[in-house]
Image (cartoon, rainbow, N blue to C red):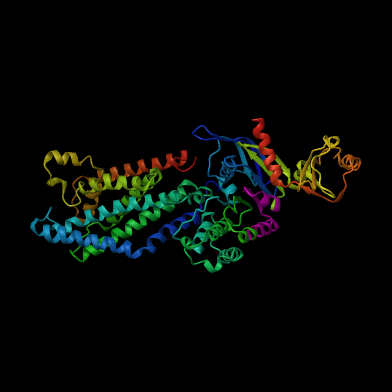
Amino acid sequence: MPIISISKLSKTYQSGFTALSGIDLTIERGEIFALLGPNGAGKSTLINIVCGIVTPSAGTVMVDGHDIAADYRAARRAIGLVPQELTTDAFETVLNTVSFSRGLFGLQPDPGHIERILRALSLWDKRDSRLMTLSGGMKRRVLIAKALSHEPRVLFLDEPTAGVDVELRQDMWRLVRDLRQQGVTVILTTHYIEEAEEMADRIGVIRRGQIILVEEKAALMRKLGRKQLTLQLQAPIVEIPPELSDYELALAGDGRELVYTYDTRAERTGITGLLTGLAAAGIRFSDLHTEQSSLEDIFVGLVREGETRA
Amino acid sequence: MSDAMSMNWPAVRAIYRFEMGRFWRTAGQSILAPVISTTLYFVVFGAAIGSRVSAVDGVPYGLFIVPGLIMLSLLTQSISNASFGIYFPRFAGTIYEILSAPISPLEVVLGFVGAAASKSILIGLIILATSALFVPLRIDHPVWMIGFLLLTAVTFSLFGFVIGLWADGFEKLQLVPLLVVTPLTFLGGSFYAISMLPPFWHAVSLINPVVYLISAFRWAFFGKADVSIAISLGMTALFLVICLGLVTYIFRTGYRLKS
């Protein structure tokens, strides 16, 4: 059974703006799922509905087998949420605010568990500090500690590394992997494609309130990835010979590099024909290398494709 | 008992303790302010003016104003504590945590309103203790006095909770307490018996709901009331039911809480 099942979920705000339209999505237990999408695509609305902060207009959401409306207590107990905004009670101490979160979820105080979380997030030394005295990165850690205080089975990270330094980002990635090891399902929204590329098992792309793609990351890279073959020429050329015009070629490096872009999905990549054509044209090369397009390229391509269609 | 029916007491306790923590953090200010203001009232109304006013219904004027003073603070403190308590998380954005936790509206209300009522009752008791320094206290019906104190604190904390949910800025948070509650309290017989008013203003005063609260509370102290205790109790209970209805409506519709 998937840990989260979303069916025909829609949300239209009172203003008439439709943020989500007929979303169907399942999240498997123990996976790291990255939800990508441009600003205003509906990522946060989707998360907020699952967590109970926004009321859906239509559709159903089941969390760990519990309906988020009819059985909201059990559904919410399974979820930890790290919101996008750094929303903290400025005058409270770290220890108090994290302990408060645990209490909200109906659990008895467990100082040992809270200490473990604070230590894991390098917050233990700051436990008696008021939140207003902490840096942005530290506040982000506090929000994660609050979300983990009740030992959730699903953790939502809404733009977790927005505006944090490289060190903290690396720490968070390590933490997310550790959580997955412990069986926690992690769903993150992010603008940083490298974050999804680094961590996610599966990737979903949302655009204008609709999921336009859900795919295993590796399969997605394989399926949609475009590769580039770069040939280092022995002698520079000023233009691409007309007999090679059928190939998607570009000159670079002051005519010393020839770049061939090809689709890995195509039945024939055309590399053999290109090399033969180059030999026939008397163009020799001293070295070559290939480069896989990044997830960011894929993402930008998908969003643009969608916008063109719309 | 089903999960939906059972109570999440740890959550109620967490909210209550969190809210009370704010009170204790500023304990000096929280305690000192009512002590100073009560002392000032006794200096002005008790010593300066009270010495020239004869006893009201056989009660010395300094003693007569004690229930009104307590009620004045009880109403304003209940409203401001409860309204600030729920408004601040909305303002700061930390309300997301309450909304995404496995808590029912009843539990949220119990936590916030319970803490707000506790704070205002504590302040009421501090004023009572301060009064004892100036006048020999007399409480004919102590159980009723505690009962009215509790009922009023809870009712007006609920009212404050509604204001805290309705307000969309700090100005609105102050609007009702300053422009409605304080004038009604002053005109509700805090410092006089409404029987002292001319017939027309006496009749007008009966529209003021605070009259019933102060009258009942004063009865608990001195056994004398401007209006019957049953009517006072009925009016307070009616206001309590209205506030409960408003809170229920807000949570059912998600007004100002959920989009």
Looking at the image, which residue is at 81% across and 39% down?
A240
The answer to whether residue A226 is above or below residue A32 is: above
Looking at the image, which residue is at 33% across and 56% down?
B120
Whether residue A165 appears in magenta in the rendering, the answer is no
Looking at the image, which residue is at 42% across and 61% down?
B21
Q: Nearer the viewer, residue B163 or B50?
A: B163
Residue A260 sits in quarter:
top right
Decide if residue B49 is on the left or right side of residue B219. left
Whether residue A172 appears in magenta in the rendering, the answer is yes
Decide if residue B54 is on the left or right side of residue B139. left
- The spot of residue A185 in percent (x, y) is 67, 51
Can residue A94 be seen at all in this image of the molecule? yes
- The spot of residue A89 in percent (x, y) is 46, 56
Q: Nearer the viewer, residue A173 or A244?
A: A244
Can residue B147 be seen at all in this image of the molecule? no
- The spot of residue B165 in percent (x, y) is 41, 45
Furthest residue in direction bottom, as rendered = A125
- The spot of residue B182 in percent (x, y) is 25, 48
Q: Nearer the viewer, residue B5 or B69?
A: B69
Query: Which portion, as a residue range, is magenta?
Result: A171-198
**Taken as a whole, is the magenta stretch helix, strand or loop?**
helix
